[in-house]
Amino acid sequence: MATAEQIKSLIRSHLNMNAEQFYASALQIAAHEARQGHDVLANDIKALVDRARKKPVETNVIAFPRELAGLILTEQPARPFSSLVVDDALKARIERVILEFRQQHKLKKHGLDHRRKLLLSGEPGTGKTMTAQVLATELKQPLHIIQMDRLVTKFMGETGAKLRQIFERMRAMSGVYLFDEFDAIGGERDLGNDVGEMRRVLNAFLQFIENDTSDNLIIAATNNPRLLDRALFRRFDDVLQYALPDTKSRIRLLANLLGTFRSPQFPLDKTAEAGQGLSHSEIDRACRDAIKLAILSNKNRVIYTSLKALLKERHAAYQRKER
């Protein structure tokens, strides 16, 4: 039987005509019923929600309190697991997260919790945000993105209070929660240039995440793992490390991105070599630019020399950033 809070949340979202929160509350009830062993009822509720969501929701600001507007965005991503190009070991660990989430009721019967607090670290553009999108897609959950850098700069002095509001709302709204640019608050507490406010915010976050008992998937992403406080790592169920794509990954990525715009004779090996040292997102952008050039030139195939030149442009951009 659904809890009183879940029923009240469902009624409030209906009266406020907040469709996304209504769906989220219904899915919370489905998860609760699944944990009680009522799988048929849980599946029926999920099926009703799936039928109601006939089309993807546009990316927009979710119905969080007005003072949090612009800091938390929601989307219903459509990123299948097959679109994620990472090494096999990392892919296996992500698959394990999906498996445990889908069968969490089995684990709970034995007093075990599923993996739901993840720390993703690695260079920009290596697949951290895409992983969050893939997880939301595979788990059929909305993706809520908390923009930590804006939270800190906009509400300096109030950040801890806003963070508390976010975690309170998480209890009533199911989904995958991505704390992006997490190092904005996660820096080492003993660094000389750290301020007292940020130390308090980090301590508050550590408390909130440790005391969170929802079934939501919580993900923190950082480009600078060396800046993170060591106390953070033990608060997460898993720490996933991301790196620039190797040759095998670059070949798979190019094949996926070019799709029908790649001729059977297209030299993937040579192109992958030209993309060495670039991130997933930089290769993605170069491929999209090459496809646009092909379309505007009234051609249905990407030319190798054109894509190679675009990859070279990306290398030059990186070199300028490092100067």
Image: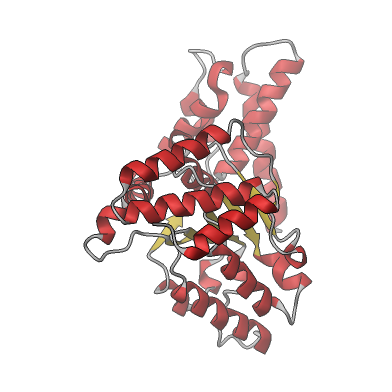
**Front residue of 56 and 253:** 56
Tell me the residue at 33%/41% (across/down). 40
Quarter occupied by the C terminus: bottom right
Tell me the residue at 65%/39% (across/down). 57
Residue at the left extreme? 110
In the rendered image, the vertical position of residue 178 relative to residue 164, given as above or below: above
Q: Position of residue 253 (x, y in %)?
A: 50, 33
In the rendered image, the vertical position of residue 161 relative to residue 294, given as above or below: below
Q: Position of residue 41 (x, y in %)?
A: 37, 44
Q: Which quarter of the figure has residue 112? A: bottom left
Quarter occupied by the N terminus: bottom left
Q: Position of residue 322 (x, y in %)?
A: 67, 57
**Front residue of 14 and 109:** 14
Residue 73 visible here: yes
Q: Position of residue 4 (x, y in %)?
A: 49, 64
**Front residue of 261 and 59:** 59
Tell me the residue at 55%/83% (across/down). 203
In the rendered image, the vertical position of residue 54 relative to residue 234, given as above or below: above
* Image side of residue 187 versus residue 316, left or right: left
